Amino acid sequence: MENTVQIPPVLIGRHDECATLKECMASNRSEFVIVCGRRRIGKTFLVDQFFENRYDFSFVGKHKTKTQTQLNYFAKAIQKYSGQKQKTYADWYDAFDALEYYLETLPVNRKKIIFIDEMPWIDTQRSTFVSALENFWNGWANRRYDIVLIASGSATSWMADKLIDNQGGLHNRITRRLYLEPFTLSETEEYFKSFDSPLTRYDILQCYMFTGGIPFYLSLMNPQMSVAQNIDMLFFHKSAPMRREYDELYSALFTHVDSYIKVIEILYDHKYGLTKREISKATKLNGTFLNTVLNNLELCDFIENFELFGKKNTLVYRLVDFYTLFYFKFIANRHNKDTEWWSHNLDDAGIRAWMGLTFELICMKHHKQIKKALGISGIGTSVSTWKCLPDTENEIPGAQIDMLIERSDKVIHLCEMKFSEQEYSITNEYEMRLRKRMGIFKERTKTKEAVVHTFVTTFGVGQGKHSSIVHSEVTMDDLFNS
């Protein structure tokens, strides 16, 4: 097997991850690489494409399969690669002994690539898998210079507990960690361009609203169809492939899945997020278990925490998974049988409101691009959210700002994010509301910093007598920057 591996042209993004894999091939030590990321993010695709499916050994764990059955499949895999008939393995120690024996028959002057996919599924109850893996790595592979062991799995919590944070034999044994994130808008555009798709940036922005840049979801789309046609095909047709995705999305990743769903549902009901204390009160989950649930949901990019401005130790958790948000809004309780419902309801107020909220979330996910467009990438910044309850005694109303960018040079950007089919027009009423809210913000926070309004819109702010309130602008095109 040739060790010089080229990045295939079909691989979108993932440049840092590919560079790391190249380093593994060139290093003078054995490498234990873990590839993490949520379900459907493209972990297997990345590894398969990078190595062009040329492994010295590969094995895929089977979901909800007994240990002996897993061992039998493992034996078949070794038999396929080695050409030697295998006996029945008594346990995972036997299995890894057989793997060692086979690998020792290979040439010594090159790296041997071992890919074990869906590793969490292999570790069934009372199996010896993890301890046997520890023995394989510590007792054999780590003492050599020519092994590249790649472990992958969607159950990010298992990968963290059993491998990354392992306090036993695998403690500090991981040499490389790859964490795959969803595509950015720029990478999503690159994906559609690879198919010569006629979709515009405005179209791609809408595609991002229900796919969230998840590669597998994008792969289900027909790049030659309109956005509305794709949504109907993916969610509303009788055989719609994404309608049932929710049923597997969380159950495939987490044990005690009901607790995770509780948190997801309560955060959906509170679009702008809740503190940990508020989540605990609403779900009756608390302590270490709630911390674990929140951490695991964050690891899988389902939720995200944001600082509450002025309260550095208070975090607000928000549901940020685009598919889940779309599912709850339009699919979960839907009884209409119209297979082209989306195309027939493009002017629906619910769709318009959803687009506005989802655009805000896209902007928050692309805050680095916003900072670049504002020319402040080189300045220290922190991104946060802010809200205050009404002060009835002093007759001061409550207020909320979804995204603030606080700069180290004493400037605060209050970001207004507006989705529109054309230039966004600021009315007199809206200008007065913004000025009033800024006044409340200054009064409540007692800030001494300069406070300005920054608008993030699809096509810019229309010039008029009320547009002078805009200090700086960012448009949709800026969000597509890499």
Image (tube, grey):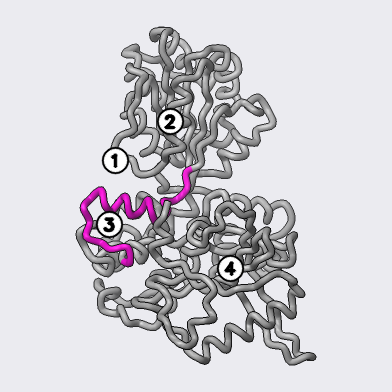
Q: Which residue is mark 3?
A: 221
4 vs 1, front mark: 4
Would you say residue 279 is visible in this rendering? no
Tell me residue 352's x, y (percent).
Answer: 39, 78
Query: Residue reaching furthest right?
Result: 393
Question: What's the distance in space between the residues labelled 2 and 3, CA to CA?
Answer: 36 Å
33 vs 419: above or below: above
Q: Quadrant of residue 3?
A: top left
Q: Which residue is mark 4?
A: 403
Quadrant of the image containing the N terminus: top left
The magenta-colored residue range is 180-202
Secondary structure found at label 3: loop
Pointers 2 and 1 in contact (C-beta within 8 Å): no
Characterize the local packing of mark 4: few (<14), some (14-19) or many (20 or more) Cα atoms within 10 angstroms: many
Foreground residue among 394 and 288: 394
As for residue 47 lying within the magenta part, the answer is no
Q: Amino acid at mark 3?
A: Met
Pointers 2 and 3 in contact (C-beta within 8 Å): no
